[in-house]
Amino acid sequence: MSTATPTLDAAPARAAPGQPLIEARDLVKTYTMGDMTVHALRGVSLEIAGGDFVAIMGASGSGKSTLMNILGCLDLPTSGEYRLAGEEVEGLAQDALASIRNRRIGFVFQQFNLLPRTSALENVELPMVYAGVKAAQRHAKALAALQRVGLGERGDHTPSELSGGQQQRVAIARALVNNPQLILADEPTGALDSKTSEDIMRLLTELNAQGMTVVIVTHETDIAAWARRKIVFRDGLIVEDVRQPGRLEKSGKLESDPNLSAQGAAR
Amino acid sequence: MNFFAPFRIALRALAANTLRSILTMLGIIIGVAAVITMIAVGSGATQRVQEQMKGLGSNIMLVIPGGITAGGVRLGAQTGQGLTEEDALAIAREVPEVQVAAPSSRTGAQVVAGNTNWSTSIFGSTNDYLEAREWPLSDGRSFDAADVQGSAKVAIIGQTVARELFGDADPLDQVIRVKKIPVTVIGVLSKKGQNSMGQDQDDVVIVPISTYRNRIQGGAGSKLKRIGSISVKVREGQSMKVAEDNIKELLRQRFKVQPGAEDPFAIRNLTEILQAQEASSRIMTLLLAAVAGISLIIGGIGIMNIMLVSVTERTREIGLRMAVGARGRDILAQFLIEAVTLSLIGGAIGVLLGAVATWGVGQFAGWQVSMSLGSIFLAAGFSAFVGVFFGFYPARRASKLLPIQALRYE
């Protein structure tokens, strides 16, 4: 089960089969606060295969968010190496990092981070605006992404007209619209009730089943239970790294879900 | 992304804080309205001077008696030995560039018609004066040879005098009393309007120079045929400079001036006087422009202030945009466009307000105003410049944010 990489279609520049999507070696991150030095990461090495579904756990201050930022090319490590899909990341300029985020990574945040007073459709179009996609194509792809998360009819709603779960679905549509290799979700259910959380996790699991690599950061055990690999952080180091059956696989729901198998067939 | 999309996005961001955006624009609105109004009033004044120059003719010179020096004290103009009617005749006869040279004298007097009276200027002159001033009659006739030779009791009056003395009645052939001398109105001048000093040029009564000399002026001056000034009109196509030099040469001979001594007369080129006035009105315009410029700068600082607030408020939005792939220059462009949109809308409102103010000044203060397309483009350009200039620093600050810090900003 561990490295079963599904066939990856349509995405540009996928890592070659067998090559990990994420290769991190000896990542160290230190912050200086006044005269105190905080060691957020103390030498973390990590490989994540394409198509995997990983949960990163740990208490606050354990370094999991710092790792997330580095994996998402939002931040650079103090030392160590990081390759994303074979591409060296450290030492790149801000503009180059922006380009990598735009092409390869989709972000999902705890607070959704949708633009206010802007329709769901335009929110989803945002990454394509910066990728230089033409308006008509942008529109069509954004609509398709919204349909993929089950919000095809809500394209013209603004965030304030949507429930929390719907907003997070819009954010997920935005994350996957540029067809990235990696979806990074930072506490994606942190602001949602348990029923809605389950819907969101189901959606992420579906996307993973369709070949998207998903990495979520959470401190909730039952959210982490949806993933197939669990990495636990403490004091800037990995203290646990285990494979586990994902929740849907365990319950056998993955195959029986009509919605999912329909989309699986479409793929 | 099409050309207008960024402006639409900027408009939406500005509309989120409508009142704040409007207050921010106020500085630009006032500045641009001031620029528009000031240019309209300034170019109106310039235009008026130019019209006067055209009305006056650019080929007019005025010869006036000069000052004399008595015991080391320099006395002002017209204290000298004075010009005479003969000097005027000599200029007309001997300087080939001169078309006409009209002698004239002037005094202020009360004129009476029936039971109304009016205080006005009395000019003694000839028909040449009207020709030199390019001033046609609207009614009646001009002086004939007999009038000028025989000190006839006739007068040509200006529009203002006609209105004040006779109202709507026909002034022709009416008798008016000038310094107790009854004279008959034979002609009415066409309307000339104000001169560059704001004097009403139509407030005038013109009598033949002989009539003025013998019946109105009296005293020693009349025997010497002294006159106040000579209005000279230079022929079309002839150089003013050459004409002026020739007149000067002729008069120096007639006055027997020693070489090296000062001229006992002065020649004024009216175009030069008007040009000097135009220059002073230009200085006024520049001063107003400085005031308008200062208010535009203040407006710009207002924009900068609000853009800085906006960047701080929207730090998370900036972080999100960066996370999904916006580069620094995308963020820079977004906030610059927002600042420019703000200042351009302010500029547009300012143009409207300026147009209304210009109309008001023209309507109620009675000033001549002239609003040009150029001033509108200038104002639009200036407000766009203000937007770019003062929007740049906040926009650059936004573009330099680090995505991770912007995203985590509380």
Image (cartoon, coloured by chain):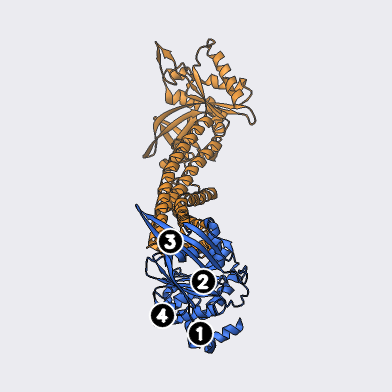
Chain colours: A blue, B orange
Give the answer, above or below, for where A13 lies relative to A151: above
Mark 2 vs mark 1: which is more N-terminal?
Answer: 2
Looking at the rendered image, the quarter that the C terminus of chain B falls into is bottom left
Mark 4–mark 3 distance (CA, rounded to whole Å): 27 Å
Secondary structure state at the residue bearing disc 1 = helix
- In the picture provided, is B103 more to the left or to the right than A36? right
Task: Check contact, mark 3 vs mark 1: CB within 8 A.
Answer: no
Q: Which residue is mark 2?
A: A183
Q: Which residue is mark 1?
A: A249
Mark 2 vs mark 4: which is more N-terminal?
Answer: 2
Observer-side mark, 2 or 1, equals 1
Is residue A73 in view from this perspective?
Answer: no
Q: Which mark is residue A42?
A: 3
Chain of the residue under label 3: A
Mark 2–mark 1 distance (CA, rounded to whole Å): 20 Å
Give the answer, above or below, for where B203 lies relative to A137: above
x%, y% of residue B253?
56, 13
x%, y% of residue A148?
54, 79
Task: Check contact, mark 2 vs mark 1: CB within 8 A.
Answer: no
Q: Which residue is mark 4?
A: A222
Q: Amino acid at mark 4?
A: Asp
Mark 3 vs mark 1: which is more N-terminal?
Answer: 3
Q: Which mark is residue B359?
A: none
Chain of the residue under label 2: A
Whether marks 3 and 1 lie on the same chain: yes
Mark 2 vs mark 3: which is more N-terminal?
Answer: 3
Mark 2–mark 4 distance (CA, rounded to whole Å): 20 Å
Q: Amino acid at mark 2?
A: Ile
Q: Amino acid at mark 3?
A: Arg
Give the answer, above or below, for where B88 lies relative to A231: above
